Image (cartoon, helix red, strand yellow):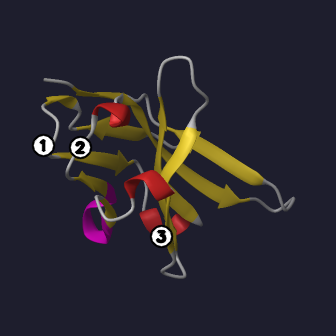
Amino acid sequence: QVQLVESGGGLVQPGGSLRLSCAASRSVFRFNNMGWYRQAPGKQRESVATFDWGGRTNYTDSVKGRFTVSRDNAKNTVFLQMNSLKPEDTAVYYCNAKTLNVGGNWDDYWGQGTQVTVSS
């Protein structure tokens, strides 16, 4: 069973920074895709920043230039550096990992979520 454990959320003022971490229970090389999603109150969960093992990264438009997704392969950990935070970034942030199974379908794994609140 895959486990993803997030940390690093909290309360920050507008313009501030936070760094989220996601520790995986197995090598990140075994995932086809990893990244971060978020869900604000009353809204659907959305993709924030993801990468695949071809080196391609994808960011939602609202965070481009402010957020950076990265990984430490040796520690099986994925990070999300968030700078210039805005109140609209307030949400629960989830780590996600995907693998393509033998049936050709995606297996999705989720962390428990970490709250990020941007407020003065």
What residue lies at 42% left-to-right and 62% top-to-bottom? 27
Q: Which residue is mark 1?
A: 16
- Tag 2's secondary structure? loop
Q: Do the residues under discs 1 and 2 have CB atoms within 8 angstroms?
A: yes
What residue lies at 61% left-to-right and 29% top-to-bottom? 44
From this viewpoint, which residue is outermost toward the right? 103
| Magenta stretch, residue numbers | 71-78
112 vs 46: above or below: above
- Which numbered disc, 3 or 2, marks the residue that appears first in the sequence? 3
Q: Amino acid at mark 3?
A: Phe
Q: Nearer the viewer, mark 1 or mark 3?
A: 1
88 vs 65: above or below: above
What residue lies at 64% left-to-right and 45% top-to-bottom? 108
Nearer to us in this view, 31 or 41: 41
Q: Do the residues under discs 3 and 2 have CB atoms within 8 angstroms?
A: no
Residue 29: numbered disc: 3
76 inside magenta stretch: yes
From this viewpoint, which residue is outermost toward the top? 42
Q: Quadrant of the C terminus?
A: top left
Nearer to us in this view, 29 or 93: 93
- Which numbered disc, 1 or 2, marks the residue that appears first in the sequence? 1
Q: Which residue is mark 2?
A: 85
Distance from the alpha carbon under mark 1 to that under mark 2: 5 Å
Q: Nearer the viewer, mark 3 or mark 2?
A: 2
Q: Amino acid at mark 1?
A: Gly
Label 2 crowding class (10 Å Cα cut-off): few <14, some 14-19, many 20+? many
- Tag 3's secondary structure? helix
23 vs 57: above or below: above
Q: Amino acid at mark 2?
A: Leu
Nearer to us in this view, 45 or 61: 61
36 inside magenta stretch: no
